[in-house]
Amino acid sequence: MIRVNNLWKKFMRHEALRGLTFSVAEGSAFALIGANGAGKTTTIKVLMNIIEPSRGEVKVMGVDSRSLGPRELSRIGYVSENQDLPERLTVEQYLDYLRPFYPQWDRELEASTVGLLHLPLRRKIGDLSHGMRTKMALACALPFRPQLLVLDEPFSGLDPLVRDEFMESLIQQAGEMTVLISSHELSEIDHFATHVGFLDEGKLLFSETMADLTERFREVRVTLEHPASEPDPLPSDWLCVRSVGSVVSFVDARFSEDTLGDRIRSLLNGVRSIDTQPMALRSIFTTLARSLRDDMA
Amino acid sequence: MMIWHIFKKDWRLMWPYAAGLAALHFASMAALLRIGRFRAAPLNWIQAGSLTALEADHTANALINVFPILSYLASCLLLVAIVQQDAIPGVRQDWLVRPIRRRDLFLASSWECCSWFSYQFSPLIYRARCSMAFRYDSPWMPRSADLCGSGLACSWGYSHSHL
């Protein structure tokens, strides 16, 4: 559905994207995660042909992103917190306006989505709260059953109830379409995303399936028979290593059930017990972000 | 072709501007009627002694001169507002991610500008022609043109607000 190959984007002297390469398979839900300024929104804007890439190849639905036209856009839904909307139109008038542009618009689906999201049809867009506006943007992106749904930070500033409503609407249709989502709210997309790409300062550090990611990251807690000290040198795939009393804890970024015990015993003496815990996407993200920050420092 | 569709949406948004400009035309016409631009009758409030005839003439002339300037500025504002409805430059505009052809967008904006010009300026041209033809002998023709223009502006604003 999406193929990005060696994508670069420069704004004056600043390199916002540096050689991104990844692909989004049809029917998958790809989460683009990263800290503020990592390049998530820039990547999405390039994909949507809102800005042009400086270098590299981007294909969306088999078409070069620079050539995306009405035919492709009629099959792509886009929701962004930064979208300018006609403020003086009511929600109903805006839906009336959009309908003719999408030949496959489903009015029943529109009505059910509007109902599910509790949107006030007669209220002007300019009078809607931030959460309502985001929900309205979603309600405008779903009724034409897009093949690709692009969501740029859709949860920013939304309260938990609105997030739930948003995700509920999304999940109801997720099976039918490919979803590309950039978000900080990782707990929301933890159970939704099938693939994850981690961006840092314009570089993609990894892109893999959610199953692989959660499989290879483990929170490890080693209890020793004597006061603990960190091994020197530290293995590169041990992140956020801490030692308190006789306990050493770290995050293993290349976890393997079979080899972990031997590895730990080769680096630490007097191992009494090893305890491993799977990690949620949010914990993986904060670990990686913290580790990168420490490396830079 | 989605030109008419885009046109309708823009007029829904622009009608307050159109109504404002129509009000300006009305005010202009009312001022002309009040000061008796087309006939030499003095104003009631001059007769009441608040101003001398000479002062009144200056004030009236100044007032009459202000309205075309205001009208011109308001027209410029309206044109800018029309063009800015779906601005080409920028990265946040909604139309960028919608299946809307740039050609349709451009034609719709052009149509809006042309229709605005035509209905704003045709009464003015008509009035000028009447004024020349009757050399102010018959004051009602220019006034009827003013009324026609303002009425037209109002009806456009009103009808488009209900498109």
Image: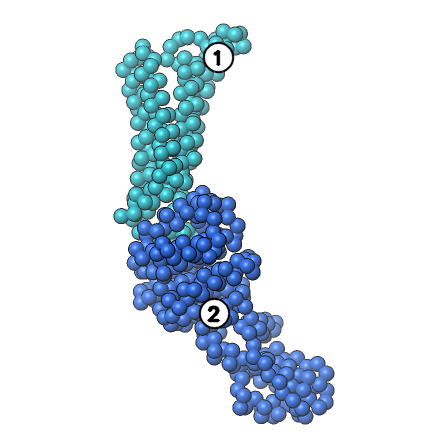
Identify the subunit bearing mark 1.
B
Q: Give A176 or A219, whichever is nearer the viewer.
A: A176
Q: Colour of chain A?
A: blue
Instruction: Tell me the kind of residue under disc 2.
Output: Phe
Q: Measured from the top left, where is residue A4 in percent x and y? A: 38, 69
The quadrant holding residue A115 is bottom left
> Which residue is disc 1 drawn over?
B56
Q: Colour of chain B?
A: cyan
Quadrant position of the C terminus of chain A in the picture: bottom right
Q: Is residue A230 left or right of residue A21?
A: right
Quadrant position of the N terminus of chain A in the picture: bottom left
* Residue A156 in sight here: no
Q: Is residue B51 left or right of residue B41?
A: right
Q: Is residue B162 above or below residue A112?
A: above
The quadrant holding residue A187 is bottom right
Label 2, secondary structure: give it.
loop
> Which residue is disc 2 drawn over?
A192
Please rate how many residues cluster around mark 1, counting C-alpha atoms within 10 Å: few if below 14, some from 14 to 19, many from 20: some
Identify the subunit bearing mark 2.
A
Residue shown at 50% from the left, 48% from the top: A128
Residue shown at 48% from the left, 12% from the top: B56
